[in-house]
Image: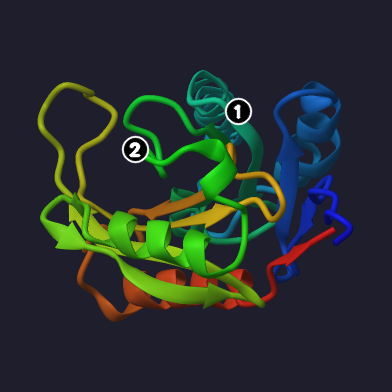
Amino acid sequence: MTATAPPATYSLVLPPGWVRIPLRDGTREALDEKVFRGIEEIPAGVPRDQGMAYRLHVRRKVDRMVEEARRAGGLDLYVPARVRSRTLMASSFLVSEIARDGDEPGDGYDDASVPGSGPQAELVLARLAADRRSGEAGELRLAGEAMAVRWEYLTVPDGSDPEVDVGCRHVDYVLPVPGDGGRWLAVSHSTAGDGDPGSAFTRALTDLFDAVMSTFQWS
């Protein structure tokens, strides 16, 4: 039987206004072209004399998100750009690669016995779904045509970060890379929404992320 080569990358269909920021190469160019150029027009509700302060706030916020995403081993960061509402800027998601090591997904299985797809991979996913995040267990869910584990949970500010003063709703997906049992992909979404993690608006943003994940494809 001929082995299937692992995919080199993935693809997603993004909603209008959302952009991909690569974190390994070309990050600054992507930020300047796709994000910072889009904040030259001040959104409605921001006083014109506060325009410069608003631009600096957005730059610092996005730069901080990029730095945190890089520390987390991220591959790509997705953010809304060229939008009128500052509230929507509180939503983003990160794609990162997880090497199967220690407590990572699939721990306890030999590489040879854990292919990136097939019944054995689904067993590992089922085992992983039992893990809890902020008290919430995962569930098996399709991301496009790929089987994944999905978690949805809330976090509240603990006072350790003065810039985080509202709760967030999170949705995480973990997928095995087909044909490579040592690599997994994590896609993590977080949003503060309108400041209320349980509001209809905030839930609508998580629904939008789930819709994006329904377009996931390996390439």
For the point 20% across and 71% down, which residue is it?
Answer: 198
Which secondary structure lies at badge 2? loop
* 214 left or right, relative to 53: right
Quarter-wise, where is residue 77 in the image?
top right
* 26 left or right, relative to 93: right
Q: Quadrant of the N terminus?
A: bottom right
For the point 20% across and 39% down, which residue is it?
Answer: 165
Q: Nearer the viewer, residue 158 or 34?
A: 158
| Looking at the image, residue 34 lies above or below residue 102 | below
Q: Residues within 10 Å of mark 1 (few under 14, many from 20)?
A: some
| Looking at the image, residue 23 lies above or below residue 154 | above
Q: Quadrant of the C terminus?
A: bottom right
For the point 16% across and 21% down, which residue is it?
Answer: 160
Q: Name the residue beneath numbered marker 1.
A: 59
| Looking at the image, residue 94 lies above or below residue 149 | above
Disc 2 versus disc 1: distance between alpha carbons? Answer: 43 Å
- Place of residue 94 in the rendered image (x, y in percent of width and height, measured from the top left): 55, 44
Residue 216, disc: none
* 53 left or right, relative to 127: right
Q: Are marks 2 and 1 in contact (CB under 8 Å)?
A: no
Q: Residues within 10 Å of mark 2 (few under 14, many from 20)?
A: few
Visible residue check, residue 40: no
Outermost residue on the front side: it is: 1
Visible residue check, residue 91: yes
Q: Name the residue beneath numbered marker 2.
A: 108
State how the image is colored.
rainbow
The kind of residue tagged 1 is Arg
- Place of residue 188 in the rendered image (x, y in percent of width and height, measured from the top left): 46, 50
The label nearer to you, 2 versus 1, is 2
| Looking at the image, residue 180 lies above or below residue 142 | above
- Place of residue 157 in the rendered image (x, y in percent of width and height, measured from the top left): 15, 38
Which secondary structure lies at badge 1? helix
